[in-house]
Amino acid sequence: MIVCHCEVVSDRDVVESIDAGARTVAQVCGATGAGRNCGGCVFSVKRLLCEHEKSFSATPFTEVAGATG
Ligand code: FES
């Protein structure tokens, strides 16, 4: 499933970035390119972080610098 239509980032890409160590929305967006345009995908990125937060203890929510929407 495509999470970010602007940058064509899939949920699999997001999960792979989490598995690789991304723990915040900003880190996921930096690793995948999601959220760099309209920002409409940020909620979906947050949701995926929440779904995978059982595998880590850091707080997953941070704002994406420069994202709008
Ligand atoms: S849908 Fe991700 S930046 Fe627009």
Image: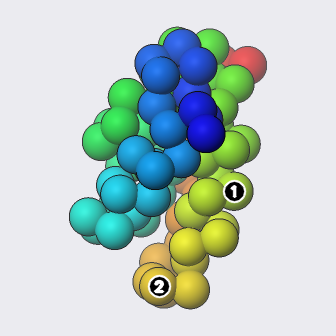
Quadrant of residue 56 within the rendered picture: bottom left
Whether residue 65 can be seen here: no
- Looking at the picture, which amino acid does disc 2 mark? Ser
**SS for callout 1:** helix
Q: Position of residue 39 (x, y in %)?
A: 62, 23
Q: Which residue is mark 1?
A: 47
Residue at numbered disc 2: 55
- Quadrant position of residue 29: top left
Residue drawn 37% across the image and 28% down it: 33
Q: How many marks?
A: 2
Asked if disc 2 is less than 8 Å from ligand 1, the answer is no
In the picture provided, is 37 more to the left or to the right than 41? Answer: left
Give the residue drawn at x 50%, y 38%. 10
Residue 18 position, x and y percent, is 39, 63
What is the CA distance from the residue labelled 1 to the residue labelled 2? 14 Å
Q: Give the farthest residue toward the left.
A: 20
Q: Name the residue: 46% across, 50% down.
A: 12
